[in-house]
Image: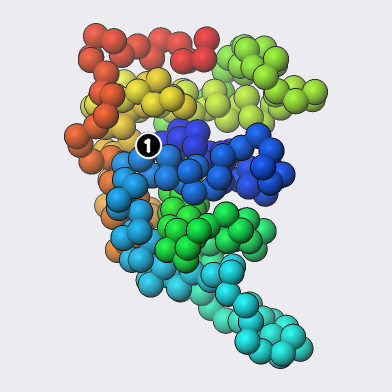
Amino acid sequence: MIIRMVGSQLFSISNLRRAKRGVGRTTAMVTLLSLGVALGTATAAEVPALASVQATTLAFPSASEPSSEPSSESSQNSDSSDEEPSTVVATLFDKSITAKDITPDDEVLAEMASQANSSEEQNAMVALASLTNLSERIIEGVLDDYFVQNNLAVDAALVEKFKTKFAGSASEDGIGDDVAKRQVMIYLAEKHMYNTYGGKVVFRQSNPQLPVGAYYKILKNYEQSGKFTILDKGLADGFWTPFAPPYQYELAKENINFAQPWWL
């Protein structure tokens, strides 16, 4: 599950693991570029620069580069490299997040390599996916903690309403309790955030009322209290960019209403 700040485009990254090539989806590059534009982390012109910075800093592996060593040695080296410590790029609640933790898995890397038209394009895909993974970890972790610290509780009635609302668009098994509860939790947390901190609210396709100003204040509070840190400058810049004004599709105050979820 992906948090709202990152946006619905992120679902397409995990979908790379499941989608069949050429069936019902756009290319990974289009998906990741739309992610960057939606977040404000990168415009189409800025993606190569972002990829260059992060690929250099984190030494992302290239799924398209063939091994120049014999297979037996390659296997041994792979086993050895798995044991080597990966660069710590961030911490969250005193736990380290390494470059390896946020790098897409081999299956996704291979899919990106097959779709990229150049190494620069592939690096852009990997850089944005890695930034996405880091942002997801941090913001979901902060949301979970915020929910607990403010004694919020999931509304069972809203959970059932969510499941009913999206029953027709789900698989044969329907919407699971975990997904529905998470969506309700996000709504209740964002409602509490806005009522407590106020700030700017923007429209996003994945969330018609995203309290970006409140998110910024809360995340800064967590960062300043040492609950999370981003040690890599390129990733830090990418993480904070969506929270910096000016915002696209900012809502007028009189149009903001958290009385009920956007999906009702």
Q: Quadrant of residue 101?
A: bottom right
Image location of residue 90, percent across then percent down: 41, 62
In the rendered image, the vertical position of residue 150 relative to residue 57, given as above or below: above
Q: Amino acid at mark 1?
A: Ala
Observer-nearest of 122 and 172: 122
Determine the residue located farthest toward the front in the rendered image. Answer: 117
Image location of residue 88, percent across then percent down: 44, 70
Location of the N terminus (image quadrant): top right
| Residue underneath mark 1 | 38
Observer-nearest of 123 and 57: 123
Image location of residue 42, percent across then percent down: 33, 48
Residue at position x 54%, y 70% in the image: 62
Residue at position x 28%, y 40% in the image: 243
Packing grade of label 1 (10 A; few <14, some 14-19, many >=20) is: some
Observer-nearest of 150 and 139: 139
In the rendered image, the vertical position of residue 72 relative to residue 226, given as above or below: below
In the rendered image, the vertical position of residue 167 relative to residue 97, given as above or below: above
